[in-house]
Amino acid sequence: MRIAVTGGTGYIGNALVDALVARGDEVVIITRRVPQIEKQRPDAAYASWEEAALPGQIGHIDAIVNLAGESINQRWTAASKARIIESRVRAAAGTAALIEAQHEKPRVVVQASGISVYGSSETGVFDETSLPQPSADDFLAQVVLKWEEAAKAIEAERVVRLRIGVVIDGKGGAFPLMALPYKLFVGGRIGSGRQWLPWIHLEDMVRLILFSLDTEGLSGTINACAPEAVTNEQFGRAISRAFKRPHWFPIPAFVFKTALGEMSSLLLKGQHVVPRQALEAGFRYRYPTVDEAMQAIARQS
């Protein structure tokens, strides 16, 4: 297939492009600024959003994976909040424009979304049939609601919306910082430790995107998280076991609230989410449990 990937230079996007190229797909990376030739991947083509929206400019596209959006891993000021939301709304609009420019429409679009749309809860269990439950002060849930609303403009034979949890891997993303206290022998629970952490290994994240591209009839919302839900306490103990470091030094919630402000909710809040649709569709996880994922990461470190 010839596949357009937005956000193809990011953490998930780069790993996805590797996998697509490895299996023989032709990849076009859509980006705000096309990098200089010497900084481009030799195994992919590049186009700006403006070029992609011009009829016939980038040629026929069989599928689109939209992963574009500004990182949430920054202090949440009024300006950064606006950028986070606007980047996702703009990417959804750009994807719709890309499709409109195609003479023959792509068969499938895989659209990134966020698992935080279900709101924060220590007691609820959410699958794809659960309704969003954001509170008025839940910024991430509001981001996803606006993101998904903008994505309704995307029209294709199949649209798969992946609500993505915390993606973990030893070489990038959030995990190296999450594991750092353990490597320094000061690991422990964060806050109460009871907050849920919907996670997925990067390899399974990429495999789920490929599964979504390839599985005819699959559409709608898919929770992109592992089948084993864990709390922050359980996640930390899994890091401790895999890296053979103590889990003993609890960090009070106020420390993160003071240091990170509202962004501390990334660590102090969560939701118990299950990937019912992925499992029922036949997707098989390579790392279904947190201990399997941690052992794999530890072996690669």
Image: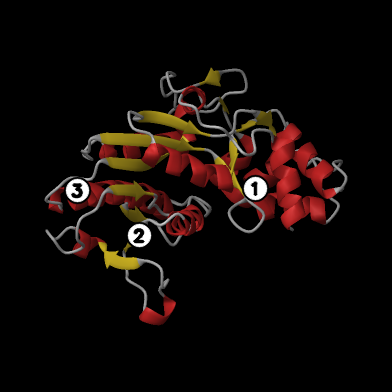
- Say few, some or many: other residues with alpha carbon within 10 Å of mark 2 (under 14 / 14 to 19 / 20 or more): many
State the residue position of label 2.
27
Which percent across, then down, holds residue 176? Answer: 68, 55
Residue at far bottom of view: 38
Q: Can residue 138 be seen by looking at this rendering?
A: no
Task: Identify residue type, mark 1.
Answer: Thr
Task: Identify residue type, mark 3.
Answer: Ile
Image point (87%, 41%), residue name: 248
Image point (49%, 27%), residue name: 282
Q: CA distance from mark 2 to mark 1?
A: 43 Å
- Which quarter of the figure has residue 198? top right
Left or right: 185 in relation to 119: right
Which element is circle 1 on? helix
Is disc 2 in contact with disc 1, using a CB cutoff of under 8 Å? no
Q: CA distance from mark 2 to mark 3?
A: 16 Å
Q: Can residue 123 be seen by looking at this rendering?
A: yes
Which percent across, then down, holds residue 103? Answer: 11, 51
Q: Nearer the viewer, mark 2 or mark 1?
A: 2
- Say few, some or many: other residues with alpha carbon within 10 Å of mark 1 (under 14 / 14 to 19 / 20 or more): few
Figure check: 205 above or below 59: above
Left or right: 282 in relation to 269: left
Q: Earlier in the sequence, mark 2 or mark 3?
A: 2
Which element is circle 2 on? strand
Task: Identify residue type, mark 2.
Answer: Val
Figure check: 107 above or below 61: above
Which percent across, then down, holds residue 170? Answer: 67, 54
The disc placed on residue 99 is: 3
